[in-house]
Amino acid sequence: MTVLWRVHIDTRTSLEERMATTDSRPQTDREEELYRIRHSTAHVMAEAVLRVFPDAEFAIGPPIENGFYYDFRLPRSLTPEDLEVIEEHMREIISGDFSFERQVVSRDEAKQLFASQPFKVELVDTIPEGDEVSLYTQGEFTDLCRGPHVESTKQLSAKAFKLLSVAGAYWRGDEKQPMLQRIYGTAWKTPKELRAHLDHLAEVEKRDHRKVGRELDLFSTHEEAGPGLIYWHPKGSRIRLAVEDYWRDAHLSSGYDMLYTPHVGKSWLWEKSGHLDFYKENMYAPMEIDNAEYYAKPMNCPFHIMIYKTQTRSYRDLPLRWAELGTVYRYERSGVLHGLLRVRGFTQDDAHIFCTPDQVEDEILTVLRFSLQVWRDFGFKDIKAYLATRPEKSVGDDESWSKAAESLRKAIEAEGLSYEMDEGGGAFYGPKIDLKIKDALGREWQMSTIQFDFNLPERFDMSFVDDDGKEKRPYMVHRALLGSIERFFGVLIEHFGGAFPVWLAPVQVVVVPVAPAFFEYAQKVATELRDKGCRVEVDLSDARMNAKIRNAGTAKVPYVAIVGEKEMESEGVAVRVRGGAQLPLMTAAAFAERVAEENSSRTLSLDPA
RNA sequence: GCCAUCUUAGCUCAGUUGGUCAGAGCACGUGACUUGUAAUCUCGGGGUCGUCGGUUCGAAUCCGACAGAUGGCUCCA
């Protein structure tokens, strides 16, 4: 309720949260088995912790995606060395072949048993009336637990788990509650699966956009100049330009108009919109100009509405589709900032659609279809929708809500998208569709959002004149496809691991002369490529050819055009494709043609064929 | 914001118990070499060891505060 329109939250998959939170049992046999393994490994870890810290107080320890965690209150902070000791104890316990014994007790018995465990006592009281209170015991450790577990520790593998990290976590996730220490671990059926998972984690680390961004000289942040604010370097900016050029073209040819609006607005605007009531804690402090308070904008919507209201709008004018790459500033708590994915200043690829109630269904379908096309063009094919409906506290009448939600559902089904319902998960001002996009490493990212707004048109008293001559309230839909350009860039970097397709690559071709004698010809080739619109660099340094090729490879440049005696004679180029493949000798003109074609068709793969 | 960890040259990192410990590789500059598909060699410049304060004869090293970064923190048997 405190948030009017946020697309910039929940940077990463909520899969983990869902597994940890929902009551849903695992779907498949394999999931069921892993669930038991992880849950049981968590108990084994708790027993190991108990051995090291006899005074430990235990909170909760559920299985999560790929692993498990357990929260404790301990007499001192854990160190990485502690994890090794705990792991050692765990291996010992696992090899001990202890069985997991289930036992049902009364609430009073449970409370007595856990007299020295305040968190457990609290948990007993949260078990719904009528549910059994069950305990699981293995070895010297007994836990209040719903189960299920493996039958015995011998069904766990001492070589298929690993403790990964220590983190702080509030008891019951409430920042007013005590801070506990959480140990995260991963557990699998076999050592091979564990290795595969650890390899996956290594790959994720390798592709980290913060690392790749520095290596490829794409962007930076500066603590002296303010955290969470992104500096786009020339190469990063070049990629952004390619993204924005595409974005603009796609919007213009899909019936959108473009807007530019100010970066700040007087307090009147934010009072009117309600942001100062509901969103103030996320806004930058006001600056005073001529005795008035101005705020840096956290959202673009009020500005677009101002433009809407400059004229009396007729039903004949609608729908209006207004898009803006609007840069907004939001105060994010210091602990949540993360590279490009969670920042304090960012550019939304924002749009607002104003339409009549009759047009809503078509508009929603069109905007959904459009966003799917955009994602496919960037090489993301695995997309899932989440349809969020009316929460308890909300504005607007029932009819509008159900009509809006219905149009969202119809659009999803018309596009054949798989989707999940998020009942009551809509914003207070309207239902929405969120799209989650899976990247090359199988991670889900929440990027696009399509949201109805029954609040702002009311607050700003927006209207259009209908065919019966009466003034009516237009429907307003917010939508962002890429979300924020910064965050999209971060995901893009990790999706491609920095090896961008030609149409996005900041440098598409590096021309490498084999010796200074061919510098002139190399420049001629570069000019020919440049004339065809290719982004090309010539390496005229006095480094050796091998070093030049290596540098281009490290920079993940798609093509290296090598020129020497043979090429000069035939006006050709010897092209090496990123990854090492070699194209057949071709003329410089033919190569330029090829790159230009890949550029304009936004080819994603780099096939030598 | 809260918990933990971290902060040494542009980057990646060494620096044993506080006492020539301010180092290496890459990058950068210089000179030589003039090369056919992932690193040629030479020499050189560069850091008040995040900031401020404290302990000590002496601090990159120990203590505290602050800043930033990193891993986490809705509900949760």
Image (tube, coloured by chain):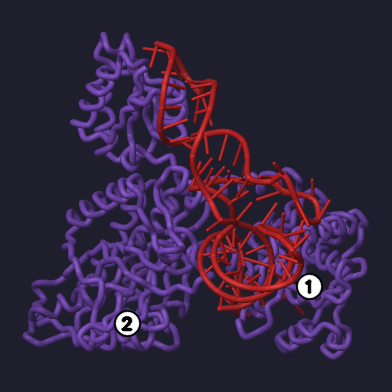
In the foreground, A139 or A347: A347
Task: Tell me if label 1 and label 2 are in contact, CB under 8 Å.
Answer: no
C-alpha distance separating marks 1 and 2: 43 Å
Q: Which residue is mark 2?
A: A286
**Left or right: A350, with B4 as reference point:** left
Residue A385: in sight, yes or no? no
Q: Which chain is red?
A: B
Residue A594: in sight, yes or no? yes
**In the figure, residue B63 lies in which quadrant?**
bottom right
Q: Position of residue A352 (x, y in %)?
A: 24, 70
Q: Quadrant of the C terminus of chain A?
A: top left
Q: Position of residue A334 (x, y in %)?
A: 50, 71
Q: Position of residue A517 (x, y in %)?
A: 31, 13
Q: Secondary structure beneath disc 2?
A: loop
Report the residue at 33% width, 83% height from top: A275
Hue of chain A? purple
Check the residue under mark 1 and report the chain it is in. Answer: A
The numbered dot on residue A76 is 1
Q: Earlier in the sequence, mark 1 or mark 2?
A: 1
**In the figure, residue A103 lies in which quadrant?**
bottom right
